[in-house]
Image (cartoon, rainbow, N blue to C red):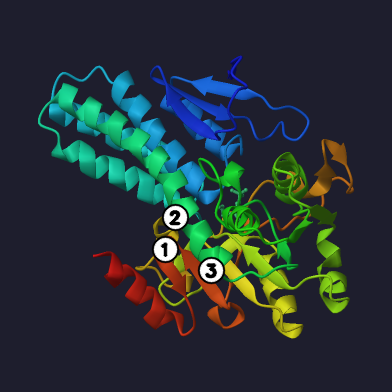
Amino acid sequence: MKEQTGIHSSLRTVEWKNNTVIMIDQTKLPNKLEYVKFKDYRKVADAIKELVIRGAPAIGVAGAFGLALASLQSKAKTKEKLLEDLEKARKVLFETRPTAVNLAWGLEKIMQIANKGNDVSEIKNLVVETAKKMAVEDVEINMKMGKFGSELFVNNDTIMTHCNAGALATVGYGTALGVIRATKDSGKSIKVIATETRPVMQGSRLTVFELKHDGIDVSLIPDTAVGYSMANKLVSKVIVGADRILRTGHVYNKIGTYQVALMAKQHNIPFYVAAPLSTFDLKSRPEDVIIEQRKSSEVTGVAGKKTAPDDINVINPAFDMTPPELISGIITESGIAKPPFEESIQKLFESRL
Ligand code: MRU
């Protein structure tokens, strides 16, 4: 059962307070800004699965907070038993969503730190403090990305975005929408076109909600109007987030991103991706990446109302892959990678060492 809190003062997607994980229930947006709180890591896993919290960086930090709860829930008296309990929790959290690599990254980071602790109380302390630090760093990283990315945009740009890669997809500020925020804050006048992003409507429910909240000029279009908007010169640039980026520059993001990128190529419109280095998976090849398939009811209905006949087959992949040749640049907290990506991505990681 989700517990309600009365906390409405901050727009933080996820945070840790008094040994409790507090998150905005994004399934309720834009109609209600409601916060839920959890003390059990299994409930955090359910929240990730049900999209109460979503967006690659946000679920990375939520996973880390999940392990922090698991460490406090554990009754282990020895280091070995505590690590065993944490490993069990890691598996439960990991299995919630397979495509966004930030989740595996966040869980791995916590497990590495846990293994360094000498005893039960030191491990618990390390795990909680590291998860809290990851949340703080997420916002700092997004702001750095925003600074780099804002240089790619000019006065009077109209920027198309797909899905929600904003404050609501991170701990705060956002990746693609962070770049848009930073561009506006640098004094440039910009407009945004947001796709509604069927079937879960992250564009209309979340991106438009967020941008309107911040006073950024935004127009909502149906996903089917991407071609129309580009052909009629309503769009000058595109920016999206990412759930996973391979060393070759293959980008996995919300279903429909590939179509937007192809259309942008056809109309000579620059197509940018903004993502932290924690979204990169330098080991996998395209054939290794699991694309999450979601339930058919997301497609056969809208807002709980049936819009398709009973018993029809549905194909509902949550993500697609955009190949590197459609991408003009990848904005990170360490700089902007430009084609050829295999080289520029490697350089970004080397410059970090
Ligand atoms: O299914 P979701 O809502 O978790 O998908 C989110 C996206 O695809 C975002 O574009 C991506 O996670 C980048 S978020 C900064």
Q: Which mark is residue 101?
A: 2
Question: In the picture provided, is 98 more to the left or to the right than 334?
Answer: right
Callout 3 secondary element: strand
- Mark 1 within 8 Å of ligand 1, using the beta carbon: no
- Mark 3 within 8 Å of ligand 1, using the beta carbon: no
Task: Select label 1 or label 2 by which is in front.
Answer: 1
In the rendered image, the vertical position of residue 77 relative to residue 166, given as above or below = above
Residue on which disc 1 sits: 280
Residue 136: image location, x then y, percent? 40, 39
Answer yes or no: is residue 221 visible. Answer: yes
Which badge, 1 or 3, comes first in the chain's sequence? Answer: 3
Residue at point 37% right, 25% down? 69
Viewer-closest of 35 and 212: 212
Circles 3, 2 touching at the beta carbon (< 8 Å) = no
Residue 237: image location, x then y, percent? 70, 71
Residue on which disc 3 sits: 251
Q: Residues within 10 Å of mark 2 (few under 14, many from 20)?
A: many
Question: In the picture provided, is 177 more to the left or to the right than 212?
Answer: left
Query: How far, Cα to Cα, is label 3 from label 2?
Result: 12 Å
Q: Residues within 10 Å of mark 3 (few under 14, many from 20)?
A: many
Query: How far, Cα to Cα, is label 1 from label 3?
Result: 9 Å
Callout 1 secondary element: strand
Quarter that holds the C terminus: bottom left
Question: In the picture provided, is 164 more to the left or to the right than 63?
Answer: right
Question: On the image, which quarter does residue 301 sit in?
Answer: top right
Q: Amino acid at mark 1?
A: Phe
